[in-house]
Structures are given as C-alpha cells and as structure tokens.
Amino acid sequence: MTGWLLVALLAVPLLGALLLVALPGVLRPWLKLYGLLVSGIALALAVVTAVAFDHGQAARPQLGLDLEWIPGLGLHFHLGVDGISLPLVVLTALLTFLCFGYLGLGDARGPGQLLWPKAGGNRPRAMVFTLLVLEVGMIGTFLALDLLLFFVFFEIVLIPMYFLIAVWGGAGRRAASIKFILYTLLGSVVMLLGLLLVWARTGTLDIVALSQAHGAGIPRAVQILAFVAIGIGLAVKTPMWPLHTWLPDAHTEAPTVGSVLLAGVLLKMGTYGFARIAIPVLPEGAAAVAPWLGAFAVVGIVYGALACLAQRDLKRMIAYSSVGHMGFVLLGFATLTPAGVNGALFANIAHGLITGLLFFLAGAIKERYGTADMSRLGGGMLATLPHLGAVLTFAAIASLGVPGLAGFWGEMLSLFGAFQPADGLPRGLFLTFMVVGGLGAVLTAAYFLVMLSRVTHGVPARAVAVPAGPAPSGPVGSASPVPLAPAGPLAADQSVPLGSPGALVADQPAPLGSSGSLAADQPAALESTGAGELPDEQPVAVVAPATDPLNGTPGAARRRAVPRDIQGYEFAAWVPLIVLILLFGLWPKLLLSLTTPAVQSLLGALS
Amino acid sequence: MIQQIDYFVIAAPLVLAVVAGLVLLLDAFLPAGTRARAGGLGLVSLAGVVVALGFVVAQAVQGDRSRATFCVPQALGGATAGSSGAAGAQGLCSFVVDQFALIFAGLVLVAAVVVVLLSMSELAGGGIPVGEWYFLLLCTLVGAVSLPSSRDLIMLVVALELVSLPVFALTALKRYDGRSSEAAVKLFLVSVVSTAVMLFGVSLLYGVSGTVFLSRLASVFSGQTAAPGAAGDYLLQAGHGLPGVVTVGVVLVAAGFAFKIAAVPFHSWAADVYQGAPVPVAALLSVISKAAGFAGLILVLLTALYGQAATWTPVVAVVAALTMTVGNLLAMRQRSAVRLLAWSSVAQSGYILAPLAVAGGASFGSEAVGTSLAYLVIYAAMNLGAFAVVMLVSRTAARNELDDYRGLAFHRPAAAIALAFCLICLAGLPPGLAGLFAKVVVFREIVEGGAGWLAVVMAVNTVIGLYYYVVWTARLFTPAVAESGVAEPVTAGVAAGGSGSPGGAGRAGGAVALAGTGGSRMLTAVWVAVGIALVAAVLFSIAPQLVLGVTSFSPAG
C-alpha cells in the first residue's frame, strides 16, 4: 500500500508545526534549520511521489488512500494524485522550501526574517509554525479527493495566510488582511453551498466517482446553479476579474514569503478547483457558463494589463499582473478543449514559478530601497545592481510570455484553445475572446517593458546622490540610499521636516540630512519592526528600534552605502525557479505529458 | 388509584433536588468561614451534578427502550375509541425518558459541571451568598433536566418556569451592583411576560383539543382524533380547515419559547442580561437555559403540533433567518466580550432553529431535530469554552472589553489558544472543524429540505459571523498596547524587549494578585472548566460522528 506517502506529505509539516508548539525551548536556537529541514523532508517526499507516480497512467488518481472519517456525513479521508495535481504538489513543496531557505539562510533583517527574533516584532517561531500549517493546507487541497475534505483544506489555508499578512505585513496590513479573509471566506461559503448542492443531488462526496459520472444524475439547471456557486468561490480565490480587489492589497502588504506563496500556490488552488471539481463534476453547467467565464477572463486580462500600466508600486503591479495571467488560465478552462485546459494548467504552473520569482525580487528590492515605488527606485538598476537587475529582467520577460520561457506555452495554448472552442460553444464569441486576449498579451508586454525601462534601465540617479552623505545603513542590511531631495514634483510630498520625530510619517522615506542617522533608519525600521504593532500604534513601534543597539552605533554608519547585489541565500532561493522556468520553457512536454491524459479524462463528457 | 412511580426514571432531577435542599441545609449549619464553606458547597453541588449525570448515563446504557412514569392508565385516559397508536401502549405519560430526553439531560448536566466550576471561581471573590447561589443553580438544573422529559403541557410549563425563576435571582445575587439588578429586572419582566403569553397559548390549545398530553395533542392536530373544543366536532385537517384559534395558540406557545431562546423579535434582553449577570450565569443562560428552551420548542412543535407543520414552518423559517441576521449584525458592533458572545449566541440560535424550518417533510422531522440537536451539542461545547476563558480574563479585567484580550497569546498562551479555538469553531472555520461540520449538517438539512433561500441567508450570516469572531481572534495575537502610551515610547520599546509588553506584565501581575485573594484552587476550577469544554470541542472536531451518531433518532416515538 502506497497511501502512506501522501499521508506523510501532510503529516511531516503538521508534525513539524506541532513539535514547534510542544518543544519551544529546545527548538528555538535551531529555528532556521528546523524550518528548512521540515520543508526539505516534505519536498523530498514530494519528489519521491513524483518518482513513484506511474507516468503512463497520469489520468488516474494514484497512490491513493481512502479512509472513512465521518460516516454520518459520508466524509472520507480520500487522497490521491494524478497528472493535474502532481505538478502542483511538487510546486507547493518547492516554493515552501525555497521560502524557508530565503528566510533562514539570509542575514537580512526584514520582517519575519528568522535570524532576528526581535522584541515584540518578528516572532520567528510563530512564522515557522504559520508557514508549516500553510503548507499542510496547500498540499492537502491538491491531494484531497473528497469534496468536503477539499473544502476543509481549502479553508485551512486562509488562517495562516491571514496571520502572515496581519502579523508580518506592511503598514496597511490590518485592512488588507481583513479584506483578504472576508472576501475569500464569502467566496468559500458560496462554494460550500455549491458543493452541498452537488452532494444533495448525487449523495456522494467522492470526487473520483463524481468525475467519472460526468454529471449524470444532476439536472442541467442544478448543474448551472452549482457551477456558478462553486465557480464564484473558486473565482474569488483565483481571482477572476470583478472579484479580484482583495488581491492587490493583500500582495502589497504581505511579507515577501507571503506574497510568494499567495501568488505561487494559493491562487492555484482556485484554478485547480475548476480542473478538479467544477468542470469534470458539472460538465453541462460548465458548458453553459463557459462563455461568461471566458468573458470575465478576457476582461480580467485586459483590465489587469491596464491596471498594471497605472501602477507605481512594484508589488502592486505584479499583483495586478497576476489578475491578467489568471485571466489566461480561466480563458483556457472556458474553452473546454484539451488544448485550452492543458494551456490553463501549464500557465498555472508557469505563473507559480515566474510570479513567485517576481515577488521574491520585489521583496528584495523593497528590502534594499525601503520602497517598492518605481518612481522612487529611480532606474538604472542594471548599472548599480547588475545581478538583481538581470534577474528582474529575466523574470519580467518570462512573465510577459517570450517564447522559450515557461510563460509562453500556457498563454499560447489558451489562446489556441479559444480559436477552436469545444463543440457546444459559440465560436465567434471565442474568436473575439482570442483577439482581445491577444491584445491583452501585448499590453502585458507593454507594462513589463515600461517597468523595466523605469527600474532597470536609465541613469541611476542614486549613483550621484549616495556618496554625498555618510548614509548609515538601516537594519535592512544597507537599505538606506534614499534619494537626496529628488528633483521634480516628488520632492514635495516626500520631504519630512527633519528633527520632528518624523517617524509618524515613516512610510515615506525621510530625506537624508545632517544628522540623518535616525531619520534614514526609519523606512527600514518600519520594515523590520512595525510588524508586531497595529498601524494606530505606529509611533511606539517606530521609535522603539532606534534604541536597538544595532542601529544607532557608529559602526552601522560606516557600512557600504550602495545596496548589496544578490546575496548567496537569495541566489539559493531563486536559482531553482530560474532553472525550472527555462526547463519548462524549452521542454514543455515534460509538463504536458503529465496533464494531457488527465485533461482528456476530465473532459470525457464533452469531447 | 395508586400511581406507580418509577424512581429510576426520575432519578436525575430527584438527585438534583435533594442536593439542592442539602446545600441549603449545609449553608445554614456550616461554620461561617467563607472560604471553606464556599469550596465545600461547590464540591457538594458538583458531586450532585455528577451523580445525576451518572444516572443519565446509566439510563442511556440500559438501552433504547424509553421509560415513562407519571402515567394515566389507558382506561382512565378518557381516550375516544378511535385513539390511535400515537399515545403508545402505556397510556398517557407525563414524564418520559427517551433518547431525546437523555441527550438533553446529558448536555445540560455536562454544561452544569462547567458552570459549577466557573461558579467556584466567581464565588471565591466574595460578595455573593454561596448557599443561595448553589441552591438556585441546582433548582434551575432540576427544571432543565426534567423539561425534555415532560410530555404534557402543564409539566412543560412548570419545568420551564423552574428553569427561569431561579435565574432571575442568580442574576441579582451580585447585590449592590446596579448593572446586575437592572439585568435581573429586565430578565424578570421579559420572562414573566413570555410565560403569560405561553400560558395563554397553552390554554387555547387545551381548549381546542381537550387534553394537555402531547401525544393526544398530536393526534388531535393531525386530524386523527376529533377535537372536542372545536365547533361542530369535526376532524382538524392538516394544513387547512383550521380554526383561527389554533393558529393563535400555536403562535403564542412558540412565542413563549422564542423568548427563552432569545429568538428575534424577542431577543432584545439578551445583551444587557448577559452583561449584567455574573459570567457563570451568562454561560448558564446561553447554554442550559437555551437548551431547555429548544427542548420545549421541539417537543411542542414536533411532537404535539406536527400535524400543523404547515402553519409553523414558515414562521420558524422567518424567525430563524431574522434571528441569525439580527444577532450577527448586532454582534459586529460590540466592544464588550460578554455582549459579543450574547449576540453571537442569539445568532447561533438562528442556526439551531433553521433545520426546524424544514421539519415539515418526511420522517416526522426526526432528521431536522437530530440536526438541531447536533448543532446545539456542538455549540454548547464551543460556547462554554469561550465563556470559561472570558471568566478567566474577567478576573483581571473587570470591564471585560475586547481590548482586554489584546496580546493574551503572549502572557497566557494556553487561555488564548483555547479561546481562539472556540471562536474559530463558533465561526465554523477549519481548524475548528466541529463548528464547520455542525454548519455543514445544517446546510445539508436545509438544502435537502428545499429551503434554499434560508441556506443563502445562513451563508451570508456565516460570513458576517466570521468577521467578528476572526477580529476577536486576531486581537488575541496582536501585541498588547503599551499602557504607558506615547509618553514614554522608548521605555515601552525597551521593556517590550523582555517579554510581551508592560501592559501584559501589568495584567499578569494583577492576575497573580487577584488569584491570591481568591485562592489558586479557584483558578484551577476555571482551568478544569476550560479543559472540559476544550476537550469536547476538539473531540467533536476530530470525530463529529460522536454527536451525529447519537443525535440521529426519531423523537418521541
């Protein structure tokens, strides 16, 4: 019996989290290694699963385990992987491991960094615990083959994510986290209603049985209703265009690892739900709603691209780009063709890798400059930080879908699917979708190129400014180079009168000045210790670190003034992603061979 | 006629009543050293409750057969010849212990253990007469245990009053406390009015049917037996041809019970009373008193008036929808922990009521009752857990506002985790699976029963509920505000380096000081209470089958 493998995949992070509660004292000094170790074991198990998986029968759920949990509800503890879920499971384990690597190996002292258990601030143990619980929920969602079990795991994810944003987030984290959890919970409850409707009609919760039935026994009207209900729940998580508004705030405020996992895995849970439940279980409902789904998806693509063009904040821009990319995924699903759905699943994985990398980069930039505002970053990154700039360029180009990188195939297949949609669907409409989607792809290229021209290219304004004063380095490594009274209209809204304990306005970098030590620390200080407090208590939070022995010392002032380029730990976290982006870009068959049989069986009723 | 009384059947209320008397005697004769007396009386009460619980368990182990006593022999029942099997072979009985009654009795008694443990801590503070407290508490329990066994309207009303009357006094026992007195007067007025309303309804039903026994009422109102009170001696047809007086009677009786469970529009007393009353009494009101109200409501609606389901199901549906909505909306605005729990328990009443709104379907509504009961049992565990932690915090923060919970996770991690788990359960989110499964069961029942709109209302309400539960939970984990405020930010920051924050340290210090006066044993009592509730909640999360299995039955034959 091979069921133990999947159970172990869930049990390892769970036990890891519980052990952390049970033995806090013992593990405290080893937190960095501990997180890395536990997530490493989970990754190893995921790899073992991928190896043990019979690739010849990717359509069939394998390595299954089916235990009765609650007979009264007919709820089974039913796990299994097939060609659709296997890549996502591995992706989840990988991203979590990389996040732990990023947190644990780094010497950066940003929010949540495990090295720096700061007073009232970072709470590294809670961070490790939260991430491990998050991993249990994410992997469980992809493994579950029971409707209610899927829902349980789907929901388990929300709470650690909420705390990740609410505790370790940026200045506006409170509002962002509440918006995040309420939005997604509202969606979840609607989804639960849809699942219960399916259950009430068919009397089973078994996803495998329901998929094989291809909607038999559920009248068309009920299928449509259930599809809409389940679809809304999934669309909130995905997010689909009119339901996306929680996403930019959540991403902007979340700490780096939160953003990475949110974009890399959590959004995939929504799209995975379409592939696993909504489409195979309710094919007639899917066929009826598909044009709408496609329309919303296309609007999302264009809207996401236009919104990106208007963004100044790097993280926010990447968040909106997710809306656009998820639009491609949804468009792929809406076509209900093997090509389209394959494209959607491919784009899913590609987006997880690329956007994960982009958020890592955005986090690294925010950590160095104290801001992610593109106009304040000032351009010329390729000159000042060549490596970071190069990786950013690579990720942006991958994200805009250049052939040869992973971002291309998913979008191409989705649009191709829209060219020839499934039989029952109006072809003319989908052709329009394809054209508009293609236009969106062009816009995507536009905003990424605009971003690159603003950030990586151009004359590095900072190169002149920095040597002018002894810029002390803040707690975020050497994060300090703040533009010296930047020219132009920006200067007006940035200037904080020196001497006033400018901390109150500290979400804007204070200008450097004669006694800039305190002032210049502030953006960074906010980054690192604002974490624990709520916005309305900011004054305390911000001034407190000024007394931290590490900051005020003259030694800190003599550190390098130029931001560091990519550090070793960052390389360690990013290289696997870069390699995979290249690999899937050059050899898409690796992934498509897994998903194709599964997609064919999933669309069985339609094709 | 000599009536045979089966004392084993009435053992549980009997034990409680005897212990209540014993407590009063001991209170009079024990030396006045308050500390020993308070503890002693508490332990005696606890022992009484446990023995009663033992009898309930023994009755449950005896088997499925329901036992009855206080029966009127068939010959004397005055039954018309056509009396069907609904009355049962034993004739008409006033007191029946069946599975339904056993579940309620067990629920009430386990909750009572928690309440008594909380009382020990409350009474240790002094200022409340101990003997009277336990006497009144036990009297309430006598009522709450006998109510679900009652099978005639008189017994039902008497039991319900036995639940309510001592609670006024319990609320007011905190003498010289304005809030407490106000709460007691409010509760008294509301309760008396509701009793009057209900008695009027009962008299109308009696007038129409000529009987007070629920089984006979059932056969009259389902049209099987002639209604002596109705003009022309015709059979009442289910659903139509109903004299208006019956509708009025049904609505009035239902309204009387609606007061007890604080259903909208009879909800407005809840927050003030919960807040004014001592915390153990609030817990008692929200679980034991509420369970009794539901037991009565289910007995009247589903046993006696099942034939008239078409009349009352729409009413129950609307009331359920309103109750959950109003309760949740009001809860969102609260700053006081107890008030929030008060409104949230109103909202939860709505969820418990919801399945009854579809009880008119097949299988005599037994599934609906089972669902309601399952929700009630799970709700009791979660809510008692929350109240137990609130009790713990109330010892150090007299006002008991939500802000007092800020940073609880840092200076009292165990309490914070317990409270967080209970709140998440109440919200119905994983990992609080107990609440989730309870809600899923209710959803399934409603959806299958065909009340889709109610399911949607409940879904929206679930989300509203999530908001305040989650916000409260989040507060547990946000660091406490430094009480020195902005004035000394630097010291605050430095002190925060130690552990938690000065606010937390101050409160912890206060906790120690207060615990010193009350005796650490009393704090232990609260911790045991927290433990019991938490173990139950965790158990129901992992194996909700325990509840669902027990509550799937057919009520009252």
Image (cartoon, helix red, strand yellow):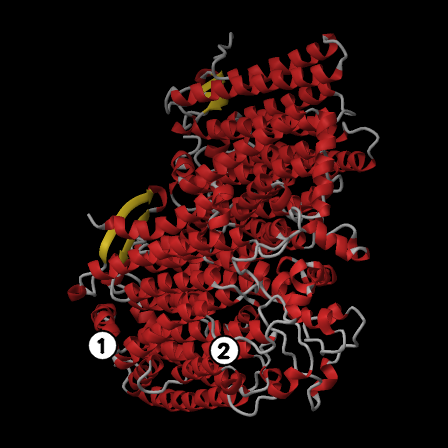
Residue B34 spot, x, y in % from top left: 75, 17
Quickly name the residue at label 2. A318
Residue at the (57%, 39%) spot, across then down: B414
Whether residue B193 appears in this view of the structure is no
Amino acid type, label 2: Ile
**Which residue is more in the foreground, B356 or B278?**
B278
Residue A302 spot, x, y in % from top left: 47, 86
Quickly name the residue at label 1. A589
Residue A111 spot, x, y in % from top left: 57, 63
**Which residue is more in the foreground, B444 or B395?**
B395
Decide: is B64 above or below B334.
Answer: above
Amino acid type, label 1: Lys
Q: Residues within 10 Å of mark 2 (few under 14, many from 20)?
A: many
Left or right of A191 on screen, residue B393: right
Q: Secondary structure at mark 2?
A: helix
Residue A317 spot, x, y in % from top left: 52, 80
